[in-house]
Image: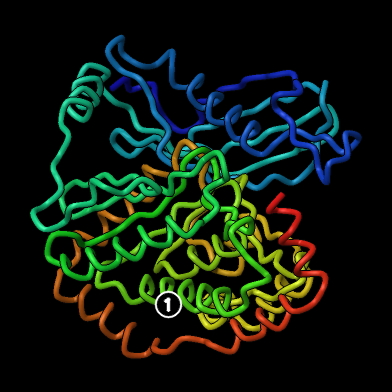
């Protein structure tokens, strides 16, 4: 590695904020601003620019992690300049202070780390991953699942919710497949140590599929509510450690699902919340799970207002462990999973057993309150809108 890579080396990169790099707040075109992921992307590339002239021909740098605060808004058409300064060199890992400014002020600042790799060896590893499709362990046959896509390697199971056209809304078929998955995991705790749940198509889950609800059949709706509650209770009690890798929407039942997992991390664009009140009913299952992960005050805040919570707020209150760029969501969740798998297996199982002992019971009252709301006009009107 080049000895010129040292603290103080600086890289800069400028870009004009175009429409594809903005987000529109509250649906108001006048409130379009430079997005956080785009700002982070510019900062990371400024760090890459700092290293690029100092690398050998067979070397490249790749992002490891980034922690950035977005402190000011920038409108479209503005030129933004990112600066990256090396602060520490630890072998092949290079640490940076990164910042970004528009023509008026500093808009973002934080830290970033990059790793220097050999491109040939990296390409070889990618080819190995593509060519090697590990088989599921004996006794864990998930080949018939359609609403869930699974991938297994070395006691780590990735499970992807697979209804991208419906923002991974959880319908009855997906519930059935998740129940089957839970049964398989409960019977195969030796073969699977960690499960990572994520969603396909840029969203974790938009919650329950409201189009499947039937306000005319209250008995069936109460049974469905209880069934959903039992499912997420089972997820909290799985013998495996569970990680929820979240992006886009994780709302309603999707937020309950995420809360049922042991560890959560999310992307900068994550929005989570409990919007059921806007449809005319309360969160109708998982109340205990939500209260234990969110706390009473935040649960009441989200469920009474129906407002969404962004990833920074979710991290600050401890609901999220990490906030990462979308490109780092799966690598970072896999890294956390590997860290768990490297712990003594007996200790992990003991921790999960203690979790089950002190987390028993299903909240039937929430489901009964849901049914009471279905007997009234607003909830029925909401369901009918989705069923058209």
**Where is residue 176 drawn, in percent x and y?**
38, 61
Against 308, residue 218 (above or below) is: below
Question: For residue 344, which quarter of the picture?
Answer: bottom left
Which residue is identified by label 1?
230
Closer to the camera in the image, 281 or 120:
281
Against 275, residue 7 (above or below) is: above
Question: For residue 56, which quarter of the picture?
Answer: top left
Residue at the image point whose x is 37% and y is 90% from the top? 358
Number of marks? 1
Q: Quadrant of the N terminus?
A: top left
Residue at the image point whose x is 26% and y is 62% from the top? 340
Residue at the image point whose x is 41% and y is 67% from the top? 261
The secondary structure type at the circle numbered 1 is helix
Circle 1 residues within 10 Å: few <14, some 14–19, many ≥20: some
Question: For residue 260, which quarter of the picture?
Answer: bottom left
**Where is residue 152 drawn, in percent x and y?**
22, 47
As drawn, is 344 to the left or to the right of 15? left
Closer to the camera in the image, 222 or 201:
222
Q: Residue furthest top?
A: 57
Residue at the image point whose x is 11% and y is 52% from the top? 137
Closer to the camera in the image, 66 or 306:
306
As drawn, is 70 to the left or to the right of 74? left
Against 57, residue 295 (above or below) is: below
């Amino acid at each position: 590695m080049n000895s010129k890579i040292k603290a103080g080396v600086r890289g800069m990169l400028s870009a004009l904020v175009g429409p594809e790099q903005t987000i529109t707040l509250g649906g108001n075109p006048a409130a379009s601003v430079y997005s956080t992921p785009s700002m982070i992307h510019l900062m990371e590339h400024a760090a890459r620019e700092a290293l690029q002239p100092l690398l050998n021909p067979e070397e490249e740098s790749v992002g490891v992690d980034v922690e950035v605060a977005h402190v000011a808004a920038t409108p479209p058409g503005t030129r933004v300049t990112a600066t990256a300064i090396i602060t520490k060199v630890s072998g092949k890992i290079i640490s940076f202070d990164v910042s970004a400014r528009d023509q008026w002020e500093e808009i973002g600042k934080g830290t970033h780390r990059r790793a220097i790799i050999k491109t040939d060896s990296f390409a070889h590893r990618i080819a190995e991953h593509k060519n090697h499709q590990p088989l599921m362990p004996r006794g864990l046959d998930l080949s018939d699942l359609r609403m869930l896509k699974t991938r297994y390697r070395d006691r780590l199971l990735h499970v992807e919710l697979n209804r991208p056209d419906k923002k991974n809304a959880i319908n009855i078929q997906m519930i059935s497949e998740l129940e089957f998955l839970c049964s398989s995991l409960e019977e195969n705790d030796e073969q699977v140590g960690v499960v990572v749940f994520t969603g396909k198509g840029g969203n974790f889950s938009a919650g329950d599929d409201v189009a499947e609800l039937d306000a005319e059949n209250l008995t069936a709706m109460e049974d469905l509510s209880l069934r959903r509650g039992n499912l997420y209770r089972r997820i909290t009690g799985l013998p495996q450690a569970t990680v929820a890798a979240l992006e886009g929407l994780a709302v309603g039942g999707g937020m309950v699902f995420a809360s049922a997992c042991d560890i959560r991390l999310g992307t900068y664009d994550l929005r989570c919340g409990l919007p059921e009140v806007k449809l005319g009913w309360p969160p109708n299952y998982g109340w205990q799970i939500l209260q234990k992960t969110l706390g009473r005050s935040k649960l009441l805040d989200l469920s009474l207002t129906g407002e969404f919570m962004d990833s920074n707020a979710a991290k600050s209150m401890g609901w999220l462990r990490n906030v990462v760029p979308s490109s780092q969501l799966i690598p970072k969740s896999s890294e956390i999973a590997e860290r768990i798998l490297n712990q003594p297996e007996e200790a992990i199982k003991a921790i999960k057993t203690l979790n089950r002992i002190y987390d028993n019971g299903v909240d039937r009252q929430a489901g009964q309150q849901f049914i009471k709301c279905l007997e009234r006009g607003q909830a029925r009107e909401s369901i009918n809108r989705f069923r058209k």
